[in-house]
Amino acid sequence: MNNKNINAALVIGIFLLFSPFAYSMQSNIEEIKLLLKNGEYVLAETLTNKSIEENLNDPELLFYKGIIETNMGKNNQAIDTFRNLTDRFPELPEPYNNLAVLYAEKGQFSLAKEILEQAIKTNPSYLTAHINLGDIFTKMASESYNKALEIDKSNNVAITKLSMITQLFNYQPNTKNTTIKVVKSKNDVNDEVLSKKDKEKYILVAIENWKRAWEDKNMDNYLNSYSPNFIYPNNMSKEEWEKYRTNRIVSKKIITISISNIKLRFKKEKVTATFKQNYKSGKLNQTSYKTLVLVGTRDQWLILEETSK
């Protein structure tokens, strides 16, 4: 069985079978779609990343980011993008599907199967995930029959079944069409405009949740407090920084953090929070002045920059 065939069959789900997201569209979405269709991936990536900074909680922009990264061969980054989407918007089946596609291309079929099952659990009528799950089972079956033939090359049962699978999967799906159809829901309305006071409440909650995750050594919640576009210190990569922070945090027996004198400055979609932070762990008792730059809308705010002095 040809690996290329199953990979192509899975990737087609990214480009041809994108269901609508019920979220408001941004004015530059059409430009991103055109750039993507024309293969202008570098320009599309630049425009998408810029748009995400201003519209952090638009899942469609994040979805396009993953698609662009996939087209550019940045599969590990695309995996991070789609994983972030599944964490933040677990009700959407499309990110699960595309995440499964990327893991399947790595040969991690068991993991891809689990993720596709989650997509179907999210939306039982999501046809793409059902088709891709069938492809995964087919590929896993072919591998099992090939292993059987390695043990006994003359086993007629394995030969017959492998031949049937090969014939079943002997087709060339169309992967040239990169047009993504997005239908805006009739019920799609703009977010209700929040007062500055209400925004402050949500931002303070985000900071408190970040602090609590740090104290509890809950690395999933802690790392998810940071934007996908977080500016990592000392020219670290995302992987290096996450490993560094994880080692620093989980190695401590007890962490106690107190925050006081929080001041917020609003500038368009960004908010700068400054405060006094007292950190205690074992014999270490350290006071610093922290600055967090947060981005987001309504009740979801993530850290874009973090500095201490």
Image (tube, rainbow, N blue to C red):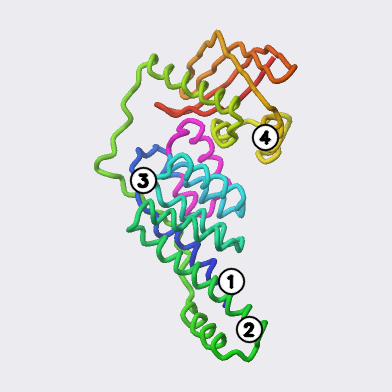
Q: Which residues are magenta?
A: 32-58
Query: Residue 122, position in %: x, y?
Result: 38, 51
Q: Quick check: is 126 in the magenta stretch?
A: no
Helix, strand or loop under label 2: helix
Q: Calculate the distance from the C-alpha at mark 3 to the C-alpha at mark 1.
A: 31 Å
The answer to whether residue 72 is above or below residue 156 is above
Which residue appears at 58% of the width and 79% of the height? 145
Q: Which residue is mark 4?
A: 246
Q: Which residue is mark 3?
A: 21
Local crowd at mark 2 within 10 Å, few (<14), some, or many (≥20)?
A: some
Q: Calculate the distance from the C-alpha at mark 2 to the C-alpha at mark 4.
A: 45 Å
Local crowd at mark 3 within 10 Å, few (<14), some, or many (≥20)?
A: some
Q: Calculate the distance from the C-alpha at mark 2 to the C-alpha at mark 3.
A: 46 Å
Which residue appears at 47% of the width and 77% of the height? 171
Viewed as shown, does residue 34 lie left or right of 273? left
Local crowd at mark 1 within 10 Å, few (<14), some, or many (≥20)?
A: few
State which quadrant residue 124 falls in: bottom left
- Do residues under tags 1 and 2 come within 8 Å of each other at their CB atoms? no
Of label 4 and label 3, which has the lower sequence position? 3
Q: Which residue is mark 1?
A: 3
- Do residues under tags 2 and 3 come within 8 Å of each other at their CB atoms? no
